[in-house]
Amino acid sequence: MTTDEVNESAPRSPTDPPRAPLRGVRRTAVVALVLAALNLRPGVTSLGPVLEEVRDSLDMSGSVTGLVTSIPAVCFAVVGSTAPLLARRFGASGVIAVAGAVLAVGLVLRSFAFDPILFVVLTALSLAGIAVANVLLPMVVKQRFPDRVGAMTGLYSMALNVGASSAAALTVPLAQAFGGDWRYGLGAWSVLAVMAVPPWLILARRRTDRPAGSTGGAAGPPPATGGRLSRDPTAWALTLYFGLQASAAYIIIGWLPQIFRDAGLSAGTAGLLFSVSSLLGVPLSLALSAVAGRLRHQSGLAVAIGACGFAGFGGLWFDPAAAPWLWAVLLGIANCSFPLALTMIGMRGRDSTTVARLSGFVQSIGYALSIPGPLVVGVLYDHADGWRLPLTFVLLLILVQIAVAVPAGRDRQIG
């Protein structure tokens, strides 16, 4: 058995000591992580730049549009909660490979939808695949790179932002290349999803751990431990922080291009501004995760990032067209709360098993808490004259996020 196979199959000690995988397998794991991360956002961020065209084509109301922007949080909360159990039964690599295939199929079928309800259902299908990978990647990092959690989290967070910004910037040009049809712009991202499947299949074939219930089971949480997390104040602080940052992030993803377009900017410019907010996360995620991994406390970083988000949304409240590039930059910095939250999850858990439990707990409940945010923004947008009332609601959410950042970033390990 190779050293890497031992990494997946053998039970880990409470201190989770680093193990050295074979160089070739470790490289495959890096490629797999990057490709999976590239696909964690295009299914979502590709929609914003063509949202107006989708609404017009499918006769979609603002409330239904708000539901569409809430689907990622719903899928991550409901489907993501099953990911640790699936990984325990079938192995993380195989589950992520299947999740990538589900994502690709969902993206293709969504581009053929001619009914708003069908569009919602197929969006949910594609995002179900994303939800599973979203929860399992922190666990894979802790398993395969236990001595480099911060750096590897930063690497796949950087790839995540590359995927998000590319989808935001290129969806409109892709649609225009095919006669301006939004269906081609959205469907094209299924190709990237297909590319992510082979390396995870390679890793899955090397897995030798036994099914759940055997003594050699690998990646999942023992069922009896879930209650312990529900009584841990640090776990709840992380959950609240994660949920609030996710709510703000999906409001940005779902509505930022529309805010700029309503202010008189073109669809292409709005998509470019949104891509800037995502593209900033490429260098910042890598640097921030590496720095956060060396700090005992991450509270100061979390508060500073939240302050940037408050300033960015405040600028949109004042006048989106006054300094759109500045607002986009500030919101891009605010989006770094996601890789910071992932880094804190990896650092709060003592070993890969605890990280898997904590990741599932924080992300499933956190995303459930984030569901109302984009939906409320859509309802307020439908019934308000302009964006000031919806953005006031968002600013209140950011203030709460800043408050819970302090206990979430304290130096305390769980497990």
Image: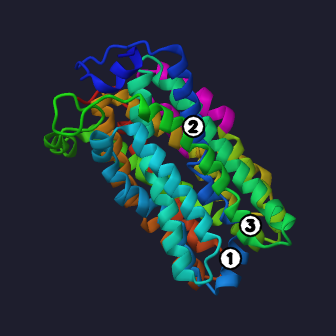
Give the labeled residue for mark 1: 54
Residue at image location 43% in from the left, 68% down from the top? 372
Q: Earlier in the sequence, mark 3 or mark 1?
A: 1
Distance from label 3 to label 2 (Cα)?
27 Å
User: Tag 1, which secondary structure?
Assistant: helix
Q: Earlier in the sequence, mark 3 or mark 2?
A: 2
Q: Badge 2, how many Cα within 10 Å: few under 14, some, many 20+?
A: many
Give the labeled residue for mark 2: 157
**Residue 132 located within the stretch drawn in magenta:** no
* Residue 311 seen in the current view: yes
In the rendered structure, which amino acid carries the disc numbered 2?
Answer: Ser
Q: Is residue 343 above or below residue 271?
A: above
Q: Which residues are magenta?
A: 282-306
The one nearer the camera, 194 or 318, is 194
The one nearer the camera, 376 or 44, is 44
Q: Quadrant of residue 342?
A: top left
Give the labeled residue for mark 3: 184
Q: Badge 1, how many Cα within 10 Å: few under 14, some, many 20+?
A: many
Q: Are marks 3 and 1 in contact (CB under 8 Å)?
A: no
In the rendered structure, which amino acid carries the disc numbered 3?
Answer: Tyr
Q: Quadrant of the C terminus?
A: top left
The one nearer the camera, 35 or 207, is 207
User: Tag 3, which secondary structure?
Assistant: helix
Q: Main secondary structure of the magenta part?
A: helix
